[in-house]
Amino acid sequence: MKNQGFLGLLTAAICAVLMVPSACLAQSKGTTVEEIIARVNNDIITLSEYQKEMGQLPDEVQQKCQNCSQDQIQAQVKDGQKNLLRDMIDQQLLIDRAKDMDINVETDLVKRLDEIRKQNNLATMEDFQKALEAQGGNWEDYKTEIRNGLLQQEVIRREVGEQMDIGSDEVKKYYDAHKQEFVRPEEVDLAQIFLSTDGKSPEEMAAIHTRAEDLHNRVEKGEDFAALAKRYSEGPTAQNGGDLGDYERGQLAGPIEDEVFKLDKGQITDVIQTKSGFNIFKVEDHFQAGLQPLDKVSPEITNRLYQQKMEPALRAYLAQLREESYVQVKPGYTDTAAVPGATVIQEVPPTPDTPEKKKDKKKVPLPKVNG
């Protein structure tokens, strides 16, 4: 998620809620009405949920495709509208499958929430919850949405991703056929150990500089750079061993660029002081301009091939889940991935509340179905 400020982050997160657990009840002249437009096993999709998702589509497309033309955005919105109910059914099918597989993502949920907390510079999870609720969000709904997303990802990883085999021969074949795509400028692949000096006194900065020099000497003597970065670095990439990724000339600050581009693979810079702290950079790899070697672009090619194969494989898997599940759709709404012979929800006129019904507002009348 790109840095868009705490308000923007939370707004996007709140708007990402795809399935509100409790159905919305519309009151009109003493009548409780809940329009159910689809049912997936024991769960329902309501008109209010569907309308909410429909209203959020333009913003979601805009965020995902920031460099797209207006025509491209409109085309993606139109496609999203056509497949919206399909996608909502897909999500519920995957969540149900995760339950069947006894998948537990609570540890990943805690990690993800903590990552978001850190991204927004909040001291505690309690502060995070208060900030979310101050923006109108519901903490439990927010956690449920993240949990559901993690469940879906894990099912796809296990049931679809692990079944796809992309061999070295296939990668080499793609590389040979698309070499022009891998002619690139000079690049360095960097890792970093960073010690912050924000708000520090001159005496404290001197002590931090001493710590940085000590870490530099430990790397020079053979200690693992990534391990030291994980333990001591105060930068956002510490958990990844300080990995910063690839940079071309012109993408780094002048003093840093001058140092790293003169180094070879495996070498480290001296301690470099910047406005925010002291840095040690390691050149994980240094690629000269021109056609990049296969070993350098192999992970990128593998990812491309994976993405090409994922969509049809996932659609086939979801079609299988539909055949094994109980999916109903109300007339007038379209599941563009419906399997032949799927049942539909029969329209049932709402009935007035009786005194007995009013005692239990949480219950939603089940729809009658054909068959």
Image: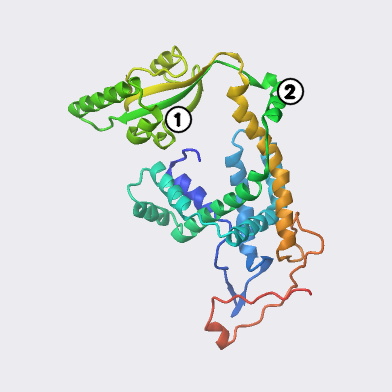
**Taking the image as drawn, is residue 16 in sight?**
no
Q: Which residue is mark 1?
A: 243
Identity of the residue furthest to the front in this view: 222
Identity of the residue furthest to the left in this view: 203
Image coordinates of residue 29 in percent, x first then y, are: 60, 79
Residue 26 sits in quarter: bottom right
Q: Residue at x 21, y 27 (%)?
A: 207
* Relative horizontal placement of residue 154, taking residue 322 as reference (left or right): left
Q: Nearer the viewer, residue 20 or 125?
A: 125
Q: Residue at x 19, y 26 (%)?
A: 202
Amino acid type, residue under disc 2 in the picture: Ala
Q: Element at badge 1?
A: strand
Residue 238 versus residue 274 in the image, above or below: below
Q: CA distance from mark 1 to mark 2?
A: 30 Å
**Taking the image as drawn, is residue 309 in sight?**
yes
Q: Which residue is mark 2?
A: 177
Quarter of the image with the C terminus is: bottom right
Amino acid type, residue under disc 1 in the picture: Asp
Label 1 or label 2, whichever comes before in sequence order: 2
* Mark 1 Cα-neighbour bin, 10 Å: few <14, some 14–19, many ≥20: many
Q: Element at badge 2?
A: helix
Image coordinates of residue 15 in percent, x first then y, are: 54, 52
Image coordinates of residue 245 in percent, x first then y, are: 49, 27
Residue 366 versus residue 58 in the image, above or below: below
Q: Nearer the viewer, residue 329 or 74?
A: 329
